[in-house]
Amino acid sequence: MTSVLATAAASSTAIGFIEVGAVALGLSLLARLAGRLGLPSIPLYLLAGLVIGEGGLVSLDISADFIARSADIGVLLLLLTLGLEYTGEELVTGLRRGMTVGAVDAVLNFAPGFACGLLLGWRVVPSLLLGGATWVSSSGVVSKIIADFGWTANRETPAVLNLLVIEDLAMAVYLPVVSALVAQRAFAATTVTVVVAVVAVAAIIAVSVRYGRHLSRALHGASDESLLLAVFGLTLLVGGLAEQVHVSAAIGAFVVGVGLSGPVQHRAGALIAPLRDLFAATFFLFFSFQLVPSTLARAFVPAVVLAAVAVATKFVTASLAGRRARLGAPARFRAGALLSARGEFSVVVASLGSTTADGSDLASVAAAFVLLTALASPLLAKWSARRPAATTTPV
């Protein structure tokens, strides 16, 4: 009996290796095809996820937990590498200057989703959740596009990153509140959760700004192997601790990158880049892997209308942020293309309403909307890349 079980386990492991290897090779071919066509790789990864995911043309029995965990790591590494490009002082200054734009962004981009839910005849809570899904841009998609197009030093990039951080910080308040509405939780308990989340965010940023130099000094003499393991482990550790207090793990990863400085900052970026590319590809694959094509088709019409409106409102936000930063029209357009994508947060927000009366409709519309904007953003970025890009050191 034991030998039979051992044989079955070995066979399952072998099949798992074969499927994961085949997926990795497939992603490699898609990345190469994207390069040949002069396109970003994100749309091809998303379409591949639909083909091999639930209800797709090919059904692979890949461990959902393995893919999901790899995808989560991909988002953290994408935000870590963006954080490595900035200092704590730049982050704090950007947040102070960007609060007004962040408030306008919240109103402009929450309204389309909330109004759509009410027009579809939904109740108030699922409409509030759809508003949250249309509000927040995808940190994962944005950071991948910036890396692919080499836009890290573009003048609009600091403004975009500031807005992403502000949105993520706002989620520290929004998520506990809507979760309480869904669960009909007491006001006092919700207030405590929100206060803890806000204090945790402030503490993470303060520690990074104040003690980041000491951390960089401690890691300066480490070998490449030791440095890679230290930065990778620290990113996951801080991200996990952030999630424990209801703060986005992406914020934790970004702040880890901001905290590193000097030669360590540049070495860490070079060492992390291959890992980032590997796990980021998994993130985009998993993003659409969990979507069911039949449910997307049912929600296609409202999702298309909502996506068109929500992309337009992000361009308005980008234009406002660009004017405050004294950016030209091409830079403002690139910022709008970047911010158009919705992603991981939108999926999380929509999933909160799965038990509500309109939960299935909410999930379908949100999934189709997210896929459309995640596909549109890199294509808009590609089109905007044809314009001359002014570059400078982030300030």
Image: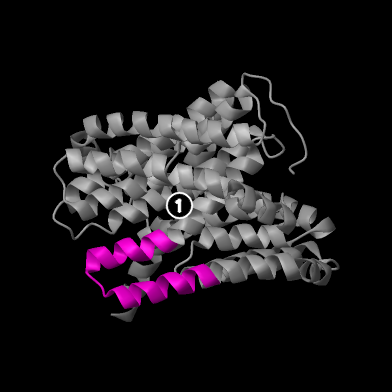
Q: Residue at x 68, y 40 (%)?
A: 152
The location of residue 218, given as percent across then percent down, is: 81, 72
The magenta stretch spans residue 2:
no
- Within the image, what quadrant is residue 32 found in? top right
Q: Quadrant of the N terminus?
A: bottom left
The location of residue 149, given as percent across then percent down, is: 63, 32
For the question of whether residue 387 can be seen, the reply is yes
Spot the residue most to the front: 100
The magenta stretch spans residue 182:
yes
Is 265 on the left-hand or right-hand side of 302? right
- Within the image, what quadrant is residue 306 found in? top left
Pick the residue in front: 308 or 89: 89
Chain part drawn in magenta: 173-199
Q: Residue at x 50, y 42 (%)?
A: 141
* Residue 201 against residue 311 in the figure, above or below: below
* Residue 12 against residue 313 in the figure, above or below: below
Pick the residue in front: 44 or 241: 241
State the SS at label 1: helix
- Within the image, what quadrant is residue 191 found in? bottom left
* Residue 395 against residue 10 in the figure, above or below: above
Q: How many labels sit on residues?
A: 1
The location of residue 119, given as percent across then percent down, is: 18, 38
Q: Residue at x 54, y 39 (%)?
A: 28
Q: Amino acid at mark 1?
A: Val
Is 275 on the left-hand or right-hand side of 42? right
Q: Main secondary structure of the magenta part?
A: helix
Question: Pointer 1: what residue?
Answer: 20
Pick the residue in front: 131 or 80: 131
